[in-house]
Image (spheres, rainbow, N blue to C red):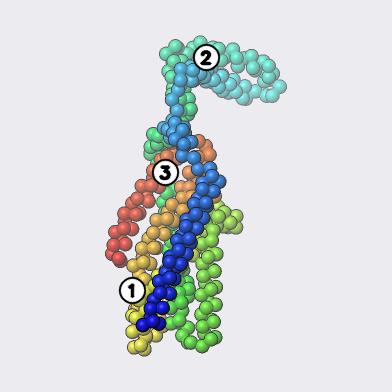
Amino acid sequence: MSDAGTTASRLTAAEPRVSRSRRIFRALFWFVCGVILIATYRWCGIDPVSLWHSRGNAVEYLFGRTFSEADLAAIRAEAERAPGYMAQGEAERRLTEKYANLPADQKPKAFQLMAETAKLKQQILAEMGPAEKEAMIAKEVRRIEFDRRGGYFPPETSPKQLAQYGKALLETMAMAIWGSLLAVVSAIPLALFTARNTLSLMLPGEGRGKRGLRAGIVFLMRRFLDSCRGFNEYVMALILVAIIGLGPFAGILALWIHTTGILAKVVSEAIEAIDPHQVEALASTGARPLQAIAFAVVPQVMPAFVSYSLLRFESNVRSATVLGFVGAGGIGFLLTDKIRGYCFREVCTMMILVIATVGLIDFFCGKLRARFI
């Protein structure tokens, strides 16, 4: 009784020390986390107040600016020069046709041609009626206002542009399909050699050499997959475009490499998390390693494999859009061209098309995923 009482008293005395140590460790852990969050908050310049103050800029950037009276007057003054520009161009065209067939020594000198052009320009302006001039000025006012207003809305909806964007979007989807398909085919064998339990089926044995060989293969495979997904598809596309040139093939290769690294890692972890009893039961009947993998491993990981593969396909559609920024083809190539040209309404149209496409893909992938899960 005395020994039991002594042991109980020691345990009772040790419990406060353990709980105190845990409290100190937790307090220190949360203190370090708080310091890291505060330091990174200041380092990254996070300022919600400035974001709120910039709301007006965001509205103007998205929906276009509003013109003041001074802006409208300046636009009107610029548009009023449109008849003069038109008359100048028409005068130069007529004089070019007039002297086109004359020898060089019979053509008027430069100053004579300038004077004749100015005289013809005034004659053309005099022939124009006030209504014609006003219609031309009003059309130019609308064009200048459209250009200067900016904004993403309303989007461009002309059939010609929509047809061009639709064709580029199909090319983007083709890139995502081929990149995802090649990754799925490559990820399956890589995952089998990366997972320890399936590797033990293919390379059985409990000797030190076999264990070392399996450990070495797993280590090398994991590092290989790390290298595949270590860089974003954008960086890989930059390298591949420099190697094989512009076009969607470079984007397909970039998506293939990156997606293979992600899928193989996820599937290998899913394989290692399966119920081992099914594999052991099948192996005990004399089944070969490939038979055990086909009938005990694959059925257990198939739902996760299909789900992750469809998820990566959805992600690759978005990634393929960005790859066009570096010349890898698809709608991203047009997107970056329009952004650099400040054609924001056309950019808005392409963004809407991409979002709608991703939504449709997500819907159909959800239907397909429901058949396997």
Q: Residues within 10 Å of mark 3 (few under 14, many from 20)?
A: some
* Residue 119: numbered disc: none
Residue at mark 2: 124
In the foreground, 140 or 212: 212
In primary-sequence order, the first of circles 3 and 2 is 2
Q: Of the residues shown, which amino acid type is indicated by label 1? A: Pro
Quarter of the rendering containing residue 55: top left
Element type at marker 3?
Answer: helix
Residue 301 image offset from top left, x and y in percent: 36, 71
Q: Of the residues shown, which amino acid type is indicated by label 2? A: Ile
Element type at marker 2?
Answer: helix
Q: Nearer the viewer, mark 1 or mark 3?
A: 1
Quarter of the rendering containing residue 297: bottom left
Residue at 50% x, 43% y is 46
In primary-sequence order, the first of circles 2 and 1 is 2
Residue 6 image offset from top left, x and y in percent: 41, 78
Residue at mark 3: 351
Residue at mark 1: 299
Residue at 39% x, 76% y is 8
Element type at marker 1?
Answer: helix
